[in-house]
Amino acid sequence: MQTIQTLFQVASAPAQAQRTVRNKKLWTPEFARFKLQFKFRDGSTSIPYHSYDIHRSKGGKNLTDESIGFSKLLLLIEAKRSQDTYVVATVWANLTDDLRTYINERLNMNYDHIVFKHVRGQNPYSSPYIKFRDGKLDVPYVQRLINEGVQS
């Protein structure tokens, strides 16, 4: 099991820290487990940032590492936090098997479970929902916490 602290340390590698957004139109991955959105002081929200889960082919088998995709979203939160531009950063998870970001050219609405929320001035690296097994979000664990009413 990986914790948020260790994920942030892994994601803080120099090569990862160089990632910047060059224009407003972002490339969106075809599949993603997580979606991040910022809320600003004036009440507006940012465009959604989807996680870039690592897909590797090993012997003809595709492997997915959602923990790396989540780590990259943490890096983006940290970068925006240092710029003092947002009030709330929220990460939603898609707990279904359909991880497409767009369905028939419309945004997938299955990102409906908040698994991570950072309110300015609070510790951004704690959430009971973040638990990975073999690089993938432990969906049964998250669903159990949601059914029990545990707050993120």
Image (tube, rainbow, N blue to C red):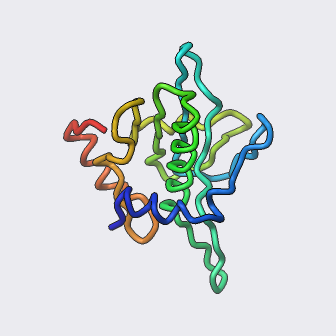
Name which quarter of the figure residue 121 lies in. top left
From the viewer's perspective, is 114 left or right of 34? left
Total number of numbered labels?
A: 0
Q: At which x and y percent is residue 113?
A: 41, 38
The one of 130 and 84 positioned closer to us in this rendering: 84
The one of 122 and 129 positioned closer to us in this rendering: 122
- Residue at x 62%, y 48% (from the top left corner): 100
The one of 62 and 86 positioned closer to us in this rendering: 86
Q: Which residue lies furthest to the left in this view?
A: 148
Q: In which quarter of the image is the N terminus?
A: bottom left
Q: At which x and y percent is residue 116?
A: 40, 41
From the viewer's perspective, is 70 left or right of 132? right
Q: At which x and y percent is residue 64?
A: 56, 67
Name which quarter of the figure residue 106 lies in. top right
- Residue at x 53%, y 66% (from the top left corner): 65
Name which quarter of the figure residue 150 lies in. top left
Q: Residue furthest bottom?
A: 59
- Residue at x 77%, y 34% (from the top left corner): 24
- Residue at x 63%, y 82% (from the top left corner): 58
In this orientation, does residue 98 appear?
no
From the viewer's perspective, is 3 left or right of 34? left
Q: At which x and y percent is residue 9?
A: 46, 63
The one of 15 and 99 positioned closer to us in this rendering: 15
Q: In which quarter of the image is the C terminus?
A: top left
Instruction: Give the vertical position of 15 relative to 24 (above or below).
Output: below
In this orientation, does residue 137 appear?
yes
